[in-house]
Image (cartoon, rainbow, N blue to C red):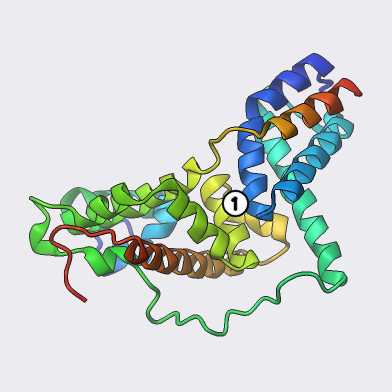
Amino acid sequence: MAVNDIDCAQALKRLIEFIDRELADADREAIERHLQTCRSCLSRAEFERALKGKLRGLSQGDVPSKTLDRITALMQEF
Amino acid sequence: MSITKEAFETQVMAILGRLHGVAARLTRNDADAEDLVADTIVRAWRARESLMAPSAFPAWIFRILNNTFISDRRRASVRGLTEPIEDTEFDDRQPFSIFERLHQPFLLWFANPEQEFLDKLLRDDVDKALAALPEHYRVVVIMADMEDLKYAEIAETLKIPIGTVRSRLARARAALQKTLWTLAQERGIEVSHAPKH
C-alpha cells in the first residue's frame, strides 16, 4: 500500500490488521489518515476495537479461593 | 537474571487473576484451568534463569502458560481426545459482521446502534460466545484479543504459518460475532434505529 490517500475498500481490507497493530508504519499512517476523514470507517474501527476490548476484559477477574490456596501452598514449597 | 523467591511470588500474585482468566477460557473447565495455572507456575519457577528482566515477567509467564496448554492438547490429540480441525463450513465470501448488520450511514451523526449493541452485551454473553468456539478458533482469539499477542508470536506458539493465523483469526472472530448476535436475539436485546432484517 503506497503512502497516499486510500479509499474505504482499501481501508476496510486491512482494518483488522490495523486494530491488531500488525501494519507497517506507512500502511498504518495511511489508514489513520483515512479514518480522520471517513466517519463510517471510523465507526467500524471503533466498533471492532471496542469488541476486542470486551474480550480483553474477560481476563480481569477474581481467582477462586481454592486456586489461590493451591498456588500459595505450591510456592511455599519452592 | 536470577529472580528471588519473594520477587517471583510477588510477580505471580500480581498477575494471577489474568493467568487464571486466560487459563479458564483456554480449558473451559475449572479443574483443568487450576491445573494449567499450577503447572505454569511450577515450570516458570524451574525456568526462572531464562527471565531476562522483571518487566518481562508477564509476557514470559504467559508464553509458558500457552506452551503448557498446547503441549497438553497435543498429548490429548495423540490419545484421540481433541476436536478435529474443520474449516469447511466457513464462507469466506460473507463473513458475519455485527457492524454490517446494524450500521446505517445516514445515522452517523445522531445515533450509534453498533455501540448501543455492545453496551447492552453482558460480560457473560461474550464469555459464552467465546466458549462456544471450536478450540482452534478459541485459542487464536484468546491469544490475540485477551493476551494481545502479535500474529508472529501466535504462529510460533501454535507452530503454524502466520498466514494461517490471519485467516483463522478472521474466521474465529466472524464465528464469535455470529454467536454474539444469536445470543443477543435470544436475550431480546433491541437496538434503536437498527435495520430490520
Residue B65 horizontal/vertical position (percent): 74, 44
Q: Can residue A21 be seen in this view?
A: no
Badge 1: chain ID = B
Q: Which residue is at a point 64% across and 55% down the rendered structure image?
A: B154
Q: In this view, does B61 lie above or below B112?
A: above
Judging by the rendered image, the residue that carries numbered circle 1 is B143
What amino acid is at disc 1? Met
Looking at the rendering, which quadrant does residue B52 occupy? top right
Disc 1 on helix, strand or loop?
helix
Q: Which residue is at a point 61% across and 63% down the rendered structure image?
A: B162
Between A37 and B140, the one lying in front of the other is B140
Q: Is residue A64 visible?
A: yes
Residue A52 horizontal/vertical position (percent): 43, 50
Between B192 and B155, the one lying in front of the other is B192
In the picture, the quarter occupied by the N terminus of chain B is: top right
Residue A3 horizontal/vertical position (percent): 31, 56
